[in-house]
Image (cartoon, rainbow, N blue to C red):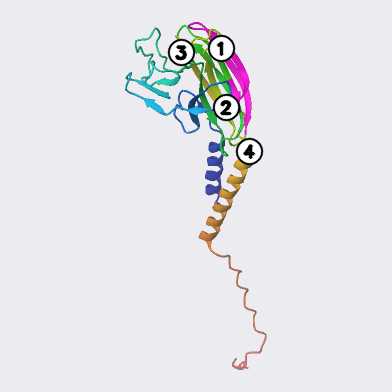
Amino acid sequence: MKKLLTMFLLSVVAATATTFDLFNDFQNSAFSYGYTTTLGGTFNPYTITDTSTHSGVTALLRSGTFTANPPYVAKNTTGSPLNVGLSFLIPSDMLDVHPGSAGEDTVIRFTATALTAGTYNVNGMFDGLDTATTDVHILDNNVAIFNGNINGKGNTSPFSVMVTLAAGDTLSFAVGYGSNGTYISDSTGVEATITPAAATPEPASLALSACGLIGVLMVSRWRRGPKMAPESPRPRSTRPNLHRPPAIA
């Protein structure tokens, strides 16, 4: 019984204390990828996955092919900086995000569930991969909580913010084409970790955990069977023994 409870509690903590990483968790179900025509506007998911235009790159975009048809989000899957014929190397530890020609923001969106709702520390940075002049943002439910600008290759915009997300809430990383109004050479890197500020589950998580705990207890009780009351000892007889032979003098 104790072993079952220990295993269950450990699984609850593991489920509610997951750290997410934009690069390592690329295409994890917690994330979605798309674009908006205005900052914080309607999210339009990318529908094309391109893995063939450039070997070692997985790109998500709305149409066309990687590099030729932004906006897009792309990952270098080789484990080393990669040259695909551009004026820069695609890093092996950051996503390559590029805004669209009509000013579309390319967006990476994290969505909390009942099991991942909670307070998170979000740390990372945006980085100019090409001669980028982009505007960069982090949004909590489409409201900007961080704003920055990238101006040139190697220019960075680090961030460290804390957010509290309920089930269904979103945390978005957005890159636009900047104040110069052009998307040319605007490849921008982004990497971030989304780390629980505490392992304490939210009420929805606690409700799910309670249901699981009740199930564990019921299974354990069923395996043991019903508890039987102990049998009382039979009282000693006080009646005389009529069959006892008489004593011999």
Disc assigned to residue 187: 3
Q: Decide: marks 4, 1 in contact (CB < 8 A)? A: no
Label 4 sits on residue: 202
Label 2 sits on residue: 171
| Nearest-to-viewer mark from 4 and 3 | 3
How far is the residue under mark 4 from the one under mark 1?
A: 31 Å
Amino acid at pointer 2: Leu
Task: Find residue 15 and report its horizontal and vertical position in percent.
Answer: 53, 38
Task: Find residue 103 and report its horizontal and vertical position in percent.
Answer: 51, 16
Left or right of 38: which side holds 45? left
Marks 4 and 2, the one that precedes in the sequence: 2
Task: Find residue 244 and report its horizontal and vertical position in percent.
Answer: 60, 91
Label 1 sits on residue: 157
Whether residue 145 appears in magenta in the rendering, the answer is yes
Q: In this picture, which residue range is highlighted in magenta?
A: 138-165
Question: In the orientation shown, which residue stands out farthest toward the front?
Answer: 102
Amino acid at pointer 1: Ser
Quadrant for residue 120, please give it. top right
| Nearest-to-viewer mark from 1 and 3 | 3
Task: Find residue 136 and report its horizontal and vertical position in percent.
Answer: 55, 15
- Callout 1: SS: strand
